[in-house]
């Protein structure tokens, strides 16, 4: 039996988790509903389905079509990665590189058609982004007006060939357009759909005089979203970026944790900061994260490892994070064989594009105690979460 002190501790932890990730089933379309401040203690429903770059398994990622598809399929939150244009406008792209070339000049990866456009041939350049040399075209070298002349393309056509039918149909959306979509669809559907922007490469953008923090806070202010009850979760793999934002906004902040390596802002500090992501998920590290962030967002195998193609025993990180008052959101659950552990792949096993048992994989993490999941297919994630709730 728990002691009185333990009961009090458990109650405090539960209250903290409830204040960030609410209980399921709360109605959001009550009289006087205002999307901009609707994310109180009853939002979002838990476990939460977060659309990773939209329904990116079904539409080219980071397009309004991908976000809308995810909403239609039951996402609670849509996630735009944020980079910034030459004239200071936040837009949604996975990386600031919108087309990347191989050494022989062929296209290695592209989320736009920019490499095919002769009028932008002179924008091709080589940059070092977070320590890696990349040759291609970059958002920060385009004004918003120029960027809007480009069209989005499927980033991984070899894995998602069906998505190529949508190539060159959609624009690169601004963060404002993503906010407008979430607001409109929330009001239309009578449920609060949140936005979870991730700041991409904040140290790099600060180094070229285009810091992301002020434009992000400015757009929150312009939209009435700079409040604790806003349906907004800001994420970052860097630490200083989140600490800076904490001084400017009360919206939910999430510390992203990679499976290896170090936050790039730590690397940029040289010998002044030698900690790794592993250090951030020690008990002391979690305690520090709680001083500036509201949730922990680790790579999925830090919660349940994969050994020889099968899930092993949970690491206990979810429970330790909860004890520190940090709900856990994991990334990224994808439906194709290419991304699934061997135990969840389906025939033909050598077909990377074939869909496996993504619901089975998701269920493993839900049972391990995570509060939210990033998924490339919100319909699959919704089915997994709904079935889990009925257990």
Image: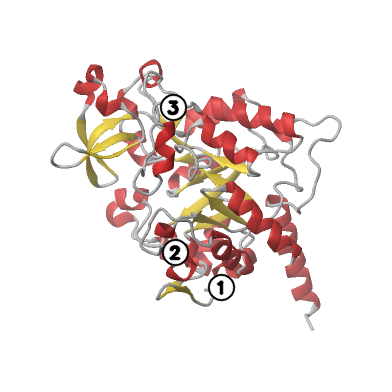
Coloring applied to the structure: secondary structure
Residue at 60% from the left image edge and 23% from the top image edge? 222
Q: In this view of the protein, which residue sits in the foreground, 358 or 165?
A: 165
Give the left or right position of residue 18, taking residue 376 as reference: right
Q: CA distance from mark 3 to mark 1?
A: 40 Å
Q: Earlier in the sequence, mark 1 or mark 2?
A: 1
- Residue under numbered circle 1: 316
Residue at 53% from the left image edge and 60% from the top image edge? 358
Mark 2 closeness class: few <14, some 14–19, many ≥20 residues within 10 Å: few
Q: Where does the image place residue 360, in percent across and percent down from the top left?
A: 57, 65
Seen in the picture, residue 110 relative to 339 is either above or below; the reply is: above
Q: Is residue 298 visible?
A: yes
Mark 2 element type: loop
Q: In this view of the protein, which residue sits in the foreground, 381 or 276?
A: 381
Based on the displayed image, in which of its 4 quarters is residue 161 positioned? top left
Mark 1 closeness class: few <14, some 14–19, many ≥20 residues within 10 Å: some
Q: Where does the image place residue 148, in percent across and percent down from the top left?
A: 41, 20
Q: CA distance from mark 3 to mark 2?
A: 36 Å
Q: Earlier in the sequence, mark 3 or mark 2?
A: 3
Mark 3 element type: loop
Kindly give the residue lying farthest to the right in the view shown: 31
Q: Earlier in the sequence, mark 3 or mark 1?
A: 3
Q: Is residue 47 visible?
A: no
Residue at 78% from the left image edge and 39% from the top image edge? 28
Label placed on residue 133: none
Could you tell me which quadrant the N terminus lies in?
Answer: bottom right
- Residue under numbered circle 2: 347
Seen in the picture, residue 238 relative to 282 is either above or below; the reply is: above
- Mark closer to the observer (3, 1): 3
Q: Where does the image place residue 57, in percent across and percent down from the top left?
A: 48, 45
- Mark closer to the observer (3, 2): 2
- Residue under numbered circle 3: 172
């Amino acid at each position: 039996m728990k002691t009185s002190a333990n009961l009090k501790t458990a109650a405090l932890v539960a209250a903290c988790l409830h204040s960030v990730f609410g209980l399921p089933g709360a109605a959001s379309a009550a009289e006087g509903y205002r999307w901009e401040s609707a994310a109180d203690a009853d939002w979002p429903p838990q476990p939460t389905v977060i659309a990773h770059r939209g329904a990116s398994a079904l539409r080219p990622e980071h397009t309004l079509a991908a976000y809308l598809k995810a909403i239609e399929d039951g996402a609670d939150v849509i996630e735009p990665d944020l980079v910034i244009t030459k004239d200071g406008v936040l837009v949604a792209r996975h990386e600031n590189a919108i087309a990347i070339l191989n050494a022989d000049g062929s296209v290695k990866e592209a989320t736009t058609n920019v490499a095919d456009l002769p009028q932008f041939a002179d924008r091709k350049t080589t940059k070092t982004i977070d320590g890696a040399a990349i040759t291609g075209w970059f958002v920060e070298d385009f004004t918003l007006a120029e960027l809007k002349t480009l069209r989005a393309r499927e980033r991984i056509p070899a894995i998602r060939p069906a998505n190529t039918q949508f190539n060159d149909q959609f624009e690169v959306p601004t963060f404002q357009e993503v906010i407008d979509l979430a607001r409109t669809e929330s009001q239309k559907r009578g449920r609060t759909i949140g936005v979870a922007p991730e700041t991409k490469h904040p140290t790099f953008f600060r180094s070229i005089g285009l810091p992301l923090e002020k434009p992000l806070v400015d757009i929150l202010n312009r939209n009435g979203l700079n409040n604790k009850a806003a349906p907004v979760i800001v994420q970052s793999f860097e630490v200083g970026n989140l600490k800076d934002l904490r001084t400017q906004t009360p919206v939910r902040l999430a510390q992203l944790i990679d499976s290896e390596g170090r936050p790039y802002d730590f690397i940029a500090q040289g010998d002044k900061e030698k900690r790794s992501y592993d250090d951030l998920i020690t008990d002391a590290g979690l305690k520090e994260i709680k001083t500036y962030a509201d949730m922990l967002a680790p790579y999925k195998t830090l919660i349940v490892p994969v050994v020889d193609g099968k899930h092993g025993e949970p690491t206990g990180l979810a429970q330790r994070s909860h004890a520190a008052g940090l709900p856990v959101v994991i990334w990224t659950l994808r439906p194709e064989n290419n991304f699934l552990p061997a135990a969840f792949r389906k025939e033909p096993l050598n077909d990377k594009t074939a869909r496996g048992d993504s619901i089975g994989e998701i269920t493993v993490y839900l049972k391990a105690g995570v509060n939210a999941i990033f998924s490339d297919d919100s319909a699959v994630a919704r089915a997994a979460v709904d079935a889990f709730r009925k257990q």
